[in-house]
Image: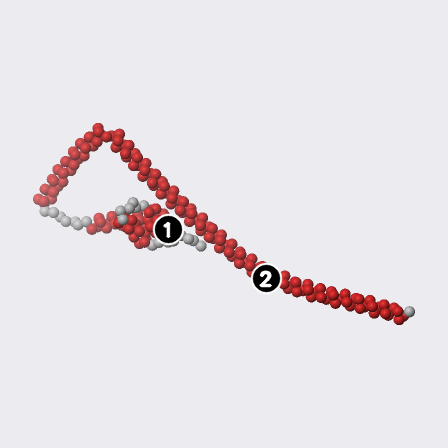
Amino acid sequence: MGRKAEFSDQQIVNAGKAIISEGKSLSTFAIRNRLNGGSSERIKTVWAEYVAQQETIIEDESPDIELPTEIAEKLEKNQQTAKNQLEKLAIESFKIAQQVAEKRVKSTIDDYQKKIWEYEESENQASIALESSDKIIDSLESQLDLLQSKNEDLIVKNSKLMGKMQANEIRIHQLEDKELELDKLYRAYGKLEGQLESLRK
């Protein structure tokens, strides 16, 4: 008998949406906690499929509108100008950032990546521990069922044995009574034999 609860794809997706709407960090472990159970691997797969589906829907819903040539050319020119300006600004900002705080930025990034790695590792270990606990509990429940079944068999056998013991006790009492009667008969026979012997003399 298994303890692990099974949840539908929609329940898993709804749990993920609820976590996002609350402004909390979304993860497989967080969804599993919200559901109070479920397989971590299945939750991860279902959520990944949902995200991919949403991206496809967004792409499909993108309007395909053909602009007039004059507007399209101006738009393309403006986009190129904005792109060039953004690239220039990005390069200048990057150079300044490198000159002023390269070590600090690197240290901050390393610390952030280390924290992410530690969080992911903790989540992975927690998921493994939960899965292992589920298996142990399932095994213990199976053993308990087996012990209960054996206990029921022992109760039945014990009941039969008690019945036999009671029957044997009754039989023993009957044999004891017969033994007493036989002893009386032997004594009576002895007396008669003595009387017979006296008469012969």
- Viewer-nearest residue: 183 or 73: 183
Q: Which of pointers 1 and 2 lies earlier in the amino acid sequence? A: 1
Left or right of 122, for residue 22: left
Q: Which mark is residue 37?
A: 1
Residue furthest out toward the bottom: 199
Q: Quadrant of the N terminus?
A: bottom left
Residue 132 seen in the figure: yes
How far apart in space, not on screen, are marks 1 and 2 (Cα)?
45 Å
Q: Identify the residue shown where x is 66% and y is 65%.
A: 170
Give the percent coordinates (x, y) of residue 25. Answer: 29, 45
Q: Residues within 10 Å of mark 1 (few under 14, many from 20)?
A: some
Q: Residues within 10 Å of mark 2 (few under 14, many from 20)?
A: few
In what element is the residue under mark 1?
loop
Q: Which mark is residue 160?
A: 2
Residue 13 seen in the figure: no
Give the percent coordinates (x, y) of residue 55. Answer: 24, 48
Amino acid beneath label 2: Lys
